[in-house]
Image (cartoon, grey):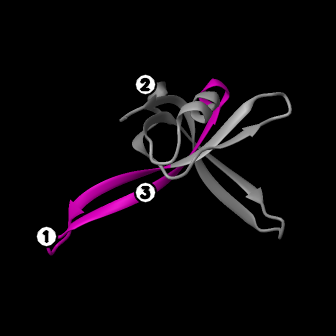
C-alpha cells in the first residue's frame, strides 16, 4: 500500500516541445507540460470541457526518450509522483511550484 501514497497517473497531450537540459555531469533533464481534459454538462445541458495543465519533469533515460520521441501535441501516459518546491525570483519574491516527477512514460496514439 505504500506505493500508492504519492502516485499520479495522467493521460494527456504535450502543450509544447520538451525543454531538454544537459547538466555538467552529462545527465539530462526534460521539462514539459501536458493537458488533461474533462467534459461534463452544465445546468443548461451544454457540454463544458475543463482543461488542466500539469508540469512534468523526467530525468536520465526518460529524458533521453522524451528528447528523441516527444513533441507538441503527442499523447502520452505519465506515471510519477507529486513534487512541491519553492524558489526565489531575481526580485526576491518566493514562488511555489508543483511538478510531477515522471517514473514511467508510455507514448500513445500515432
The mark tally for this picture is 3
Residue nearer the viewer, 29 or 8: 29
| Residue located 58% across and 28% down the image | 65
Q: Which residues are magenta?
A: 34-62
| Residue located 79% across and 64% down the image | 89
Residue 45 lies in what quarter of the image? bottom left
Q: Is disc 3 surrounded by few (<14), some (14 to 19) or many (20+) residues within 10 Å?
A: few
As helix, strand or loop, the secondary structure at mark 2 comes to: loop
x and y percent of residue 87 in the render? 75, 56
Q: Which residue is mark 2?
A: 1
Q: Please indicate whether residue 43 sits to the left or right of residue 29 in the image.
A: left
Q: Which residue is mark 1?
A: 45
Q: Which residue is mark 3?
A: 52
* Residue 46 shown in magenta: yes
**Distance from Cα at disc 1 to Cα at disc 2:** 40 Å
Could one spot residue 79 in this view of the protein? Answer: yes
x and y percent of residue 20 in the render? 68, 40
Question: Is residue 84 shown above or below 30?
Answer: below
Q: Is disc 1 surrounded by few (<14), some (14 to 19) or many (20+) residues within 10 Å?
A: few
x and y percent of residue 70 in the render? 53, 37
Seen from this angle, which residue lies furthest front? 110
x and y percent of residue 30 in the render? 65, 39
| Residue located 20% across and 69% down the image | 42
Mark nearer the viewer, 2 or 3: 3
The disc, 2 or 3, on the residue closer to the chain's N-terminal end is 2
> Which secondary structure is most common in the magenta stretch?
strand
Residue nearer the viewer, 110 or 100: 110
Question: Is residue 53 shown above or below 94?
Answer: above
Seen from this angle, which residue lies furthest left? 45
* Residue 20 shown in magenta: no
Amino acid at each position: 500500500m505504500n506505493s500508492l501514497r504519492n502516485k499520479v497517473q495522467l493521460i494527456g497531450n504535450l502543450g509544447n516541445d520538451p525543454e531538454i537540459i544537459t547538466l555538467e555531469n552529462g545527465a539530462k533533464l526534460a521539462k514539459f507540460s501536458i493537458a488533461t481534459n474533462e467534459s461534463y454538462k452544465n445546468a443548461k445541458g451544454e457540454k463544458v470541457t475543463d482543461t488542466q495543465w500539469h508540469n512534468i519533469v523526467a530525468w536520465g533515460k526518460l529524458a533521453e526518450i522524451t528528447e528523441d520521441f516527444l513533441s507538441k501535441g503527442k499523447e502520452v501516459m505519465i506515471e510519477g509522483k507529486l513534487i512541491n518546491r519553492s524558489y526565489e525570483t531575481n526580485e526576491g519574491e518566493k514562488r511555489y511550484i508543483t511538478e510531477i516527477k515522471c517514473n514511467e512514460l508510455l507514448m500513445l496514439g500515432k
